[in-house]
């Protein structure tokens, strides 16, 4: 086996592994769709970018007759990303992040002028940290969204 074939085999193996991991991440995200934990959102986007990059490299080197099973897996994975994630899950994430940020911001605005106890200040600090994380995550998700628009 020459070095090109070895490289292709390594990338193929990586693609199978990474696309299966992506499938599990998306399933996990769907199970937690109501709460959408921040720590579950960004890893899915990173995994999509990773799998899409590997897929692109493989498509450039793929022999469609010799690698039918791999081609089938690439098509299946591309469809999962396009149809399940980009068309359905991604817009929901954008909407939920936007709504959550607006709710937290409104909460801060209505409580701004009130006298606060130490406990209230600590709770506000936690809420502020949650807001910061959500805004940062939303910015990341918006970058992904811009990439979809460019395609």
Image: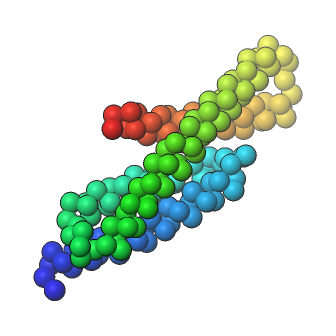
Residue 105 coordinates in the image, percent (x, y): 69, 23
Considering every residue shown, the one lying at the far left of the view is 2
In the image, what residue occupies the spot 43% across and 62% down? 76
Residue 127: quarter of image? top right
109 left or right, relative to 75: right
Number of numbered markers: 0
In the image, what residue occupies the spot 72% across and 38% down? 126
Task: Pick the quarter of the image with the N terminus.
Answer: bottom left
Q: Is residue 138 visible?
A: yes
17 shown above or below 118:
below
How is the rendered protein coloured?
rainbow
In the image, what residue occupies the spot 79% across and 13% down? 113
8 left or right, relative to 134: left
In the image, what residue occupies the spot 36% across and 55% down? 52
Q: Nearer the viewer, residue 5 or 43?
A: 5
40 left or right, relative to 141: right
Considering every residue shown, the one lying at the far top of the view is 113
Residue 47 coordinates in the image, percent (x, y): 45, 57
123 left or right, relative to 101: right
72 shown above or below 124:
below
Q: Is residue 132 visible?
A: no
Q: Nearer the viewer, residue 138 or 130?
A: 138
Residue 108 coordinates in the image, percent (x, y): 73, 22
């Amino acid at each position: 086996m020459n070095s090109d074939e070895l490289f292709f085999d390594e990338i193929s193996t990586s693609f199978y592994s990474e696309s299966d991991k992506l499938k599990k991440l998306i399933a996990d995200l769907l199970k937690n769709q109501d709460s959408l934990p921040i720590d579950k959102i960004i890893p899915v986007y990173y995994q999509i970018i990773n799998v899409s990059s590997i897929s692109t490299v493989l498509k450039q080197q793929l022999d469609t007759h010799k690698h039918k099973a791999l081609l089938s897996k690439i098509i299946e994975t591309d469809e999962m990303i396009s149809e399940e994630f980009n068309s359905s899950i991604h817009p929901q994430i954008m909407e939920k992040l936007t709504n959550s940020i607006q709710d937290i911001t409104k909460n801060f605005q209505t409580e701004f002028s009130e006298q606060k106890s130490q406990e209230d200040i600590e709770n506000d600090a936690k809420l502020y940290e949650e807001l910061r994380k959500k805004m940062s995550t939303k910015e990341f998700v918006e970058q992904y969204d811009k990439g979809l628009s460019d395609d």
